[in-house]
Amino acid sequence: MNLNESPRCRGLLADRFDLAGARAWMAAICGPHRLDAARPERIRFHHSGNVLPTSAITLGHVEYGTDVTIGVGEEATLDCYSLSLPLGGEQELDLAGRRLRSDPGLGLVLSPDQSQRLTIAGNCRKLQVAIPRRALVEVLEALLERSVVQPLHFEPQMDAVDGATGAWWRMARHLTDELARGAALYGQGLFSRDLESAFIKGLLLAQPNSYSDELQARQAPQLPHYLVRARDFMRTHARENLCLEDIERAAGVSRFKLFEGFRRHFGVSPMAFLKRHRLLAVRQALLDDHSPRNVSAIAMAWGFTHLGRFSCEYRKLFGEPPSATLQRLAAQRDASC
């Protein structure tokens, strides 16, 4: 793959002096929301940042110049997880009857599908991180090795000084500062892809969320040896024409015990686990070489002989057909040119 053809970081810069303009700009990044101000004529909105090439994470700095209130509800839900940390000034989140203050020592996480209201002081300049819902869920599913159905919700208040969350915010600051200096390294997809994944993993593991218990359990060495053998066998031979009998032999247990173990620890059957691994591998390959002519060849190389069925399964898992994945990457590449 030609590195010059990889998607690159896209710089963002906006100054707006009206509510509608500020709302429209941030809606394109975070999703639909309401924006109100007691003195709208005093709006001095400024946003500078960068969009990372693979996951479309946006990092930058935001300020409004006057007191504003952002409202998110069922009729206007976010498309991303919006994380913010004041560098100066304060903000306050109203969520489910809780009022949560945020200052340079405490960040906030706004999760999609929750009614909430964020009040931002006029003197508040903050670090803003927007992670698309799709990108976060993909990393979560890869960590859990299964599909997730229930919404992912984070504890909204996030320590920015101590512990794992403090380390995550320091990483966010460093990455934002480095991107502002130039994206010569971070704009290369072959480098940035793993970095972006690690950034999201750090958030999932550091900040309490609705999947924290399961994530912690998966870090413990509790997987039975026969499941480790079966899993490793499937990963190693995923490109081959495997059948259930092959996996049984590798595991060294009965079919009943194999199914019971996979259901208990992975939530799916052995063959469904294999199919998901193959789909993830195809998606990674498409991200590595985003050329439309390669979709069929890549899918067949990973054992998908019925391309129509493959496309349906891909859409079901990732929420978009393979062609849309390629189109999205092409759009990011064109926007950065």
Image: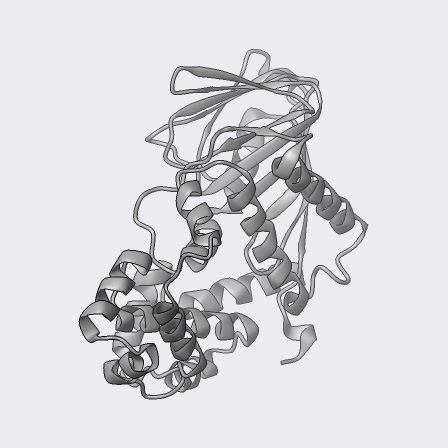
Spot occupied by residue 180 in the image (x, y as percentages of width and height)? 77, 47
Q: Left or right of 191: which side holds 296?
A: left
Given residues 146 and 263, the one toward you in this image is: 263
Q: Is residue 88 visible?
A: yes
Q: In this view, does 118 lie above or below 207?
A: above
Q: Left or right of 168: which side holds 312?
A: left
Residue displayed at 44% across by 59% down: 142
Q: Is residue 13 visible?
A: no
Q: In which quarter of the image is the C terminus?
A: bottom right
Residue located farthest toward the right when viewing the structure as drawn: 181
Toward which corner of the image does residue 33 lie, by quadrant? top left
Q: Left or right of 141: which side holds 26?
A: right
The chosen color scheme is one colour
Q: In this view, does 163 lie above or below 263?
A: above
Spot occupied by residue 88 in the image (x, y as percentages of width and height)? 73, 22
Spot occupied by residue 145 in the image (x, y as percentages of width and height)? 39, 60
